[in-house]
Amino acid sequence: MLHHRLTIPALAACVTFMLALFISSPTQGQTVGAVPGLGSPLSGLPLERTGTAMHAGSWDRKGRNGDFRTIEPGHPLVLLNYHGAGIVRRFWCTVPSDTKIRCQLILRMYWDGEKHPSVRVPLGAFFGVGFGKQVDYRSAPLEETSGGYNCFWPMPFHKSAYWTITNETKHPVNNFYWNIGFDAYKHIPKKMLEFHALWRQENPVPPGQNYVILNTTGRGQYVGTALFMQDLQNSGLEFLEGNEMVYIDAPKHSHYYQGIGPPKPGQFMPAIEGTGTEDYFCSGYYFNHGTYSAPYHGCVIKSNKLKRISAYRWHIEDAIPFKKSIRFTIQVGPWDNIRAAYASVAYWYQTQPHPVYPKLPPPAELLPVNPVPLFKVPHAIEGESMVPQAKATSGYVGKQNMSGFNGNWSGGAQLFWHGQTRNATMTIQLPAKKAGDYFLAGYFTKAPDYGIFQVLSHGRKLGHPVNAYAGSVMPTGRIPLGRIYLNAGNNPLVIRMAGKARESLNYFFGLDALVLKPAP
């Protein structure tokens, strides 16, 4: 006995667009219309479809087995060219496994004779996976499975459909296969909106600014996000602290509130504000259970080593309608203070015409961003490593991630002593492999609320008092502290808060690293 199962994508083709269920109309001939009262995607299958099944693909027109095409550099290959009304149901393709191919083949879709594409996305990103990777996953409208790339977003068109793919690599792309299945009709309802998808990137995202996934005008509904996030300053995955902020039908030239500090008069407030990036993707705690895929959301790439995330979220059950415009943004870190490279694909349906998309960057900039090596002071004893044994007479000692500030801190973090008062002391343990004389140098932090400190060893002052006040947060660089005798093992080193500059707001202290060099 043969057993047949309806796959997730097949279910999605019905779930995502109930207008795709058809009934006959005696007065209009082959016409598509909505069927009310059908809640299950399976329940619509017995209803007769009145459209004509159509297909475009790469099969060998000569009846042999050369069912592929070669895409020459700089030349578009036409995938679909149909005149008339219809709805695309399925798009499948497969390409050689290569990062450049997935990043530098550009897919474009034009509806109803428009001059500018409604879809313009690198091929790999269109299918929901970033960084030029191929990752097997399954979701309702998009998936990658065992070398195949599948799309089940329904795509209506009223007059024509024209698709191209352009090779922006420097070499021919061989063995490109595709199939496009669509239904043809004499006409479809005027209210049917057209499918759009736009890829964009910012490297890096400007500090203090939300990353903009989509900013468009018209009438429609937002249905999906694929977001690819890459840390550039060794902050780990802290960029995931950013909230999505969606502005709907804003007046022209609005000044948007971006979630940093209290709102100011006249700022346009988001209609939707979330609680964190992984929360938007229906997950939690920095995707702490790792990668997964579900029908409407998933995380397909998570690398703590490379500090990158590729995730998707389909608004199939909760499409976001807009009447005039939509601006879909997300914070990069809690206050847009993480240096990161973001790329994304926005998916939505809207009326035509749509705004013309900005030009694509040069092909080399379509490739994944390489992670930045972690900055390290040579031979450093990291300040944050001394936190567990630190003891202060007042205040609190902890580790502070410095990735949100301009400048380089060794290991991306520091020991942070805060809440203390004048003349308070903090004792840390300075390790030495063997007894002897050493030259000691320190790397500290300056900031608007830092004090004046003195380093001491066994009651003897090392170097001069250091005024750590500055108008902004910055590393001090190397500060020589002089010669010191150390026993093998841990040696107590005291930091005394001697005072503060008049301009300083507090007595805080930051230790980035200490460096020992054997003295002759």
Image (tube, helix red, strand yellow):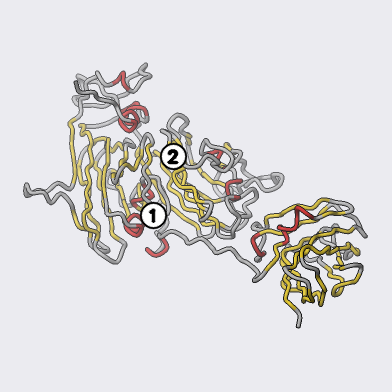
Local crowd at mark 1 within 10 Å, few (<14), some, or many (≥20)? Answer: many
Residue 406 in the image: above or below residue 68: below
Towards the viewer: 105 or 5: 5
Q: Identify the residue under disc 1.
A: 132
Q: In which quadrant will I find the N terminus?
A: top left
Q: Position of residue 102 (x, y in %)?
A: 34, 54
Task: Report which quarter residue 490 is drawn in.
Answer: bottom right
Which residue lies at the image location 26% right of the left edge and 23% below the top edge? 22
Q: Identify the residue under disc 2.
A: 224
Q: Is residue 353 visible?
A: no
Q: Amino acid at mark 1?
A: Gly
Q: Position of residue 137 (x, y in %)?
A: 38, 40
Q: Position of residue 66 (x, y in %)?
A: 12, 51
Q: Amino acid at mark 2?
A: Gly
Question: Which secondary structure, mark 1?
Answer: loop
Towards the viewer: 252 or 135: 135
Local crowd at mark 2 within 10 Å, few (<14), some, or many (≥20)? Answer: many
